[in-house]
Amino acid sequence: MRKKRDFPGSNPQLECVGMSIDQIAAEALRLPPRERALLAESLWESLEDPFKAPGDMDDKSALSLAIERERQMESGEVKPLSHEQLMAKLRR
């Protein structure tokens, strides 16, 4: 169970209803660096497994997976995404 963070100066009565991700991001960027880091950590920890890659994979399995994914990209079976494209998909 993840613990809920209390951000300094936060007001639990406030809601982000009607705010776009860009608006929320703009507000978050106004926070001091330490508070932004806490927010980033909290957001990251809230994700189940954004990459769906098992952390207990041994080296041989990881290498096989990397080779297979490279083959898929080179054959055109899958299309690689840029960082910007990936982040846009994750924001949806």
Image (spheres, grey):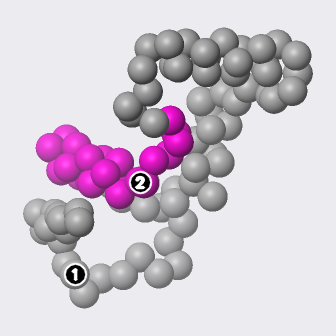
Please report the residue visible at 77 percent of the width from the left and 14 percent of the height from the top.
71
Give the answer, above or below, for where 20 lies relative to 42: below
Magenta stretch, residue numbers: 31-53
Across and down, in percent, residue 61 comes to 53, 20
Disc sitting over residue 12 in the figure: 1
Q: 26 and 62: which one is in front?
A: 62
Give the amino acid at mark 1. Answer: Pro
Give the answer, above or below, for where 68 lies relative to 48: above
Disc sitting over residue 47 in the figure: 2
Element assignment for label 2: loop
* Quadrant where the N terminus is found in the figure: bottom left
Element assignment for label 1: loop
Q: Is residue 32 visible in this depiction of the protein?
A: no
Question: For the image shown, how many numbered marks are present on the structure?
Answer: 2
Across and down, in percent, residue 85 comes to 67, 37
Residue 23 horizontal side relative to residue 28, left or right: right
Residue 82 horizontal side relative to residue 74, left or right: left
Give the answer, above or below, for where 64 lies relative to 56: above
Give the answer, above or below, for where 36 lies relative to 56: below
Most prominent secondary structure in the magenta stretch? helix
Look at the image and say whether residue 41 sits in the magenta stretch.
yes
Please report the residue visible at 44 percent of the width from the left and 27 percent of the height from the top.
57
Give the amino acid at mark 2. Answer: Leu
Q: 41 and 67: which one is in front?
A: 67
Residue 83 horizontal side relative to residue 53, left or right: right
Look at the image and say whether residue 1 sits in the magenta stretch.
no
- The residue carrying pointer 2 sits among few (fewer than 14), some (14 to 19) or many (20 or more) residues within 10 Å by Cα, namely few
Residue 78 occupies which quadrant of the picture? top right
* Quadrant where the C terminus is found in the figure: bottom right
Which sits earlier in the primary sequence, circle 2 or circle 1?
1
Please report the residue visible at 51 percent of the width from the left and 19 percent of the height from the top.
62
